[in-house]
Image (spheres, rainbow, N blue to C red):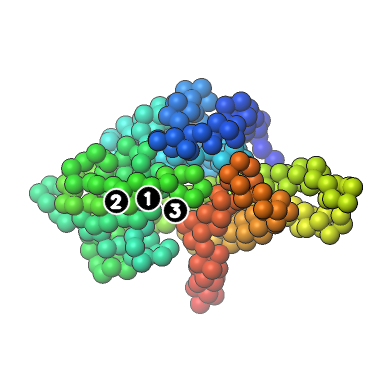
């Protein structure tokens, strides 16, 4: 199988890499995440107007560039290399993933706003005590006139402090953990009844705890069928996990490259520590984990257009490899740097923190191993 990029995909990668190399250096990022806002809206604007990458994965009839999962993979891997905090995953991959399948005029208009850099999204899907089970939804949406009234709480909503809109899972029927009865709603974050508690995450992003108190939305806020949004949630979440794996590959490459560079310059007993065979073996093991992760990420993106079960198996297999690699490569990078690897002044510590959170984001290694096993057993049965 030919896994090389097309000329257009290579150009996209080079353009993103060049921009981030010029405008997204470590010191600039560090200053941005320490600022009151935690991000740079001017960078987001540049993504839309200078690079056009906010529309790279949208179809041309929606104003996009006609790309797909591979274009998303290319962008996310470069974002991982630069530790980009701007909400591309939440807005373009997740928000755009839902909206481009909604089929409503409002959704199409919001896709245009995303491409233009005028709308940002956060996915409010996690709840306390739900672990990684997105079907465990206690938030309710009850019919109210021609629309709905949403009440409940969402936890660790990544990117919510920067979002103009929220995509919210809510139960319209069924018991708390049933997949049937889960619906999906588009909510303006400034709507009456929405309150947030914002906070920084350990990897430099921002998140919110969100309370919905009798939030009224119209019938056009419903994304997908009432009571039947679960298949769509699974599909878009799998796309998000695949994109997260691509970001992880960029992070892992930088962890490995940074470690090799450091060991070449750090001397002990009159020679660089990179000359010690035992450390060379360790860095080769790190390199193998990085390359395996890149291959699994590519595999996951290729299978996104397959049947639901095959897509889910490919994505979970990739997330298992990426999760293990994030732990192995991250911990070894810090060990080979010594205590200074965890200082805020060194980039390697920031990459380690991001790798650590990716390891558990949208499901841990154990969660995805169990998911893969369940899908494999169902197929055998």
- Is residue 371 among the parts visible in the rendering? yes
Q: Is residue 153 left or right of residue 379?
A: left
Task: Say which element carries label 3.
Answer: helix
* Disc 1 to disc 3, C-alpha distance: 14 Å
The image shows residue 138, relative to residue 341, as above or below, that is: below
Which residue, given by chain and number where applicable, does mark 2 sit on?
210
Farthest residue, direction top = 50
Q: As rendered, which of 62 and 287 lies closer to the eye?
A: 287
Where is residue 117? Give x, y as percent: 41, 29
Q: Residue at x 23, y 46 (%)?
A: 194
Where is residue 370? Give x, y as percent: 52, 70
Which residue, given by chain and number where applicable, does mark 3 sit on?
237
Task: Say which element carries label 2.
Answer: strand
Q: Residue at x 71, y 44 (%)?
A: 258
Which residue, given by chain and number where applicable, does mark 1 sit on?
157
* Disc 1 to disc 2, C-alpha distance: 8 Å
The numbered mark, 1 or 3, whose residue comes first in the sequence reads 1
* Disc 2 to disc 3, C-alpha distance: 20 Å
The numbered mark, 2 or 3, whose residue comes first in the sequence reads 2
Q: Nearer the viewer, mark 1 or mark 3?
A: 1
Where is residue 60? Give x, y as percent: 45, 30
Q: As rendered, which of 292 and 204 lies closer to the eye?
A: 204
Q: Residue at x 20, y 55 (%)?
A: 151
Please tell me in which quadrant of the rendered image residue 283 appears: bottom right
Tell me whether circle 1 and circle 2 mark residues in contact (CB < 8 Å).
yes
Q: Residues within 10 Å of mark 3 (few under 14, many from 20)?
A: many
Task: Say which element carries label 1.
Answer: strand
Q: Residue at x 38, y 53 (%)?
A: 156
The image shows residue 26, relative to residue 174, as above or below, that is: above
Where is residue 359? Give x, y as percent: 55, 57
Q: Nearer the viewer, mark 2 or mark 3?
A: 2
């Amino acid at each position: 199988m030919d896994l090389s990029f097309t000329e257009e995909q290579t150009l996209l990668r080079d353009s993103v890499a060049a921009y981030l190399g010029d405008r997204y250096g470590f010191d600039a990022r560090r200053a941005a995440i320490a600022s009151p806002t935690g991000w740079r809206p001017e960078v987001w604007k540049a993504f839309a107007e200078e690079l056009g990458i906010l529309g790279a994965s949208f179809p041309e009839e929606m104003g996009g560039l006609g790309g797909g999962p591979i274009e998303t993979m290319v962008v996310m891997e470069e974002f991982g290399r630069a530790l980009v905090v701007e909400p591309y995953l939440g807005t373009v991959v997740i928000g755009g993933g839902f909206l481009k399948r909604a089929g409503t005029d409002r959704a199409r208009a919001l896709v245009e706003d995303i491409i233009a850099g005028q709308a940002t999204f956060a996915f409010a899907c996690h709840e306390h005590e739900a672990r990684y089970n997105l079907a465990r939804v206690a938030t309710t949406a009850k019919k109210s006139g021609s629309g709905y009234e949403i009440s409940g709480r969402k936890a660790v909503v990544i990117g919510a402090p920067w979002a103009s809109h929220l995509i919210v899972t809510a139960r319209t029927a069924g018991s708390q953990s049933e997949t049937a009865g889960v619906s999906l709603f588009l909510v303006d974050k400034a709507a009456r009844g929405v309150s947030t508690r914002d906070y920084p995450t350990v990897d430099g992003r921002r998140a919110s705890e969100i309370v919905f108190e009798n939030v009224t939305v119209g019938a056009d806020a419903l994304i997908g069928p009432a009571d039947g949004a679960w298949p769509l949630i699974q599909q878009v979440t799998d796309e998000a996990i695949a994109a997260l794996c691509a970001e992880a590959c960029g992070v892992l490459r930088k962890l490995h490259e940074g470690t090799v560079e450091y060991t070449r310059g750090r001397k002990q007993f009159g020679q660089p520590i990179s000359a010690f065979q035992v450390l060379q073996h360790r860095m080769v093991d790190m390199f193998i984990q990085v390359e395996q992760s890149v291959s699994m990420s590519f595999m996951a993106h290729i299978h996104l257009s397959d049947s639901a079960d095959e897509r889910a198996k490919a994505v979970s297999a990739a997330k298992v490899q990426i999760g293990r690699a994030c732990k192995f490569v991250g911990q070894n990078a810090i060990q080979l740097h010594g205590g200074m690897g965890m200082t805020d002044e060194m980039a390697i510590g920031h990459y380690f923190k991001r790798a650590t959170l990716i390891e558990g984001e949208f499901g841990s290694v154990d969660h995805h191993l169990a998911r893969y096993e369940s899908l494999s057993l169902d197929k055998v049965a």
